[in-house]
Amino acid sequence: MKPARVAEPRPYHHGDLRRALVEAGRRLLEAESGSDISLRAVAREAGVSPAAPYHHFRDKSELLDALAMEGWDQLADQMRADLAPTEPGQDRLVALGIAYVRFSRENPAIYRVMFDCSQNHEAMPSKLREEGAYRLVRDALIESGLDPSDEMGLELASTAVWCAAHGVAEMVGFREFSPLKAHLGGEEAFLRALLSRLTLFTAERERPAG
Amino acid sequence: MKPARVAEPRPYHHGDLRRALVEAGRRLLEAESGSDISLRAVAREAGVSPAAPYHHFRDKSELLDALAMEGWDQLADQMRADLAPTEPGQDRLVALGIAYVRFSRENPAIYRVMFDCSQNHEAMPSKLREEGAYRLVRDALIESGLDPSDEMGLELASTAVWCAAHGVAEMVGFREFSPLKAHLGGEEAFLRALLSRLTLFTAERERPAG
DNA sequence: TGCTTATCTGATCGTTGTCAAGATTGGCTT
DNA sequence: AAGCCAATCTTGACAACGATCAGATAAGCA
């Protein structure tokens, strides 16, 4: 109800308002809310007028795009961090999946913004492919035995893994799964069970044509 | 811009406005738009004042719930219809998955509403479990060889399949996958490739503990 | 010094979800 | 059949939203 930033006297020109807006947006997304962030609220949080953001972003969705980019970066960092201590072997793909889902669970609003942006653009940011989470998955697939020269096979497998991880990420919160989680001994075990089943195809790639 | 329903003289009391509102909502969701349906627009489409819906739904989200329910029913019908002509055997699970994704592709706005409602309630409607799509998946899993008495195993497998289907449904539209689709000979083949890989665990349930 | 340009404000428009108060009417009671 | 009740629908209003515009401000450069 009260303004979150109470008029600490700021020079008329902000310096780097664009950056400040993105950080204000992140702050609001992290503070639970519901991912339906309001551009006016972001401006308020940054201590600036409702029209100011329009000098740095064409419209609201462009601010969300910027937030999404930061999110993809943060996700990739976290996946790399979670992957680092694991041994080379079959399960690194599952470890990546768990890191992915964990991020979406710990930052639900940000994840929603990230995915909605990708959906609106009908593509994932290309940075994602080259150095982000997509690349990590692809490398893990090669490590697990897929033919590095089979471009389409790799692409298909990466896509499958990504779809599975996204599906799990969006559904794992359903309360209806609580008994199952309890039975398996917690959410992490639940995730491992789901993801290891869904990535079984990496070990058994050939399949009778249907 | 013009009112969609031009004042065909209607008695002051509508008769079954609740039904009319749901159908108006469906009409708007089917007409592309973007799933961000406006309650005022629904009232407009039904030829009624903006406040009228509040006598039949507590708020906007309750109208969306009703639309979601209809959607789950329609999805189950379509999955049953698509499943009917298939032979008993391994691929019925994939057929169900393809039907699921096809529905989400042909009714993107409705599907979004369906899933958002489930997410807000943190559970899927119980009708879904007992006679809807969930039940169809479960039956197909039993048919494919899973132990019908292993309650938790079935639940886990159904959950995995559902997650995979949802993930595919939300990502298959990405333009970035176009080369892959073309290489495989179309979207249906693409879906089959993804879903058959992701459901491989039905044939190979046991797995070295990780 | 004065001019140019980028940045920020204030006011405003059309739209949204929601609510309170009043109009209208079908159905029940007598 | 007369009268009332409760359900239904409308009107009008409110605050908040995204977006736009003219104008104020200040920084950088001539």
Image (cartoon, coloured by chain):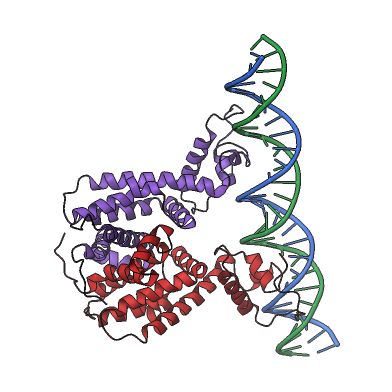
Chain colours: A red, B purple, C blue, D green
Residue drawn at x 71%, y 74% as measured from the top left: A5
User: Who's the residue at 51% across and 70% down the image?
Assistant: A110
Is A124 situated left or right of A107 in this image? Answer: left
Q: Which is more toward the observer, B132 or A183?
A: A183
Q: x, y percentage for residue A46? A: 67, 74
Res B63 seen here? yes
Taking the view exactly as shown, the residue that stands out farthest to the left is A208
Q: Which quadrant of the figure contains the N terminus of chain B? A: top right
Quadrant in the rendering for residue B168: bottom left
Q: Nearer the viewer, residue A208 or A123?
A: A208
Residue B205 appears in which quarter of the rendering?
A: bottom left
Q: Tell me: A64 left or right of C7.
A: left
Q: Is residue A196 above or below residue B100?
A: below
Which residue lies at the image location 52% right of the left edge and 53% below the top edge? B36
Percent from the top left, x then y, of residue C12? 75, 56
User: What is the x, y in percent for residue A100?
Assistant: 40, 74
Asked whether residue B3 appears in the rendered view, the answer is: no
* Front-lying residue, C25 or D18: C25
> Could you say which is closer to the camera, residue A41 or residue B161?
B161
Up-down: is B30 above or below A137?
above
Q: Is residue A32 above or below residue A80?
A: above
In percent of width and height, residue B158 lies at 30, 58
Vertical placement of A166 versus B112: above or below?
below
Q: Residue at x 26, y 81 (%)?
A: A142
Q: How many marks?
A: 0
Image quadrant containing the C terminus of chain B? bottom left
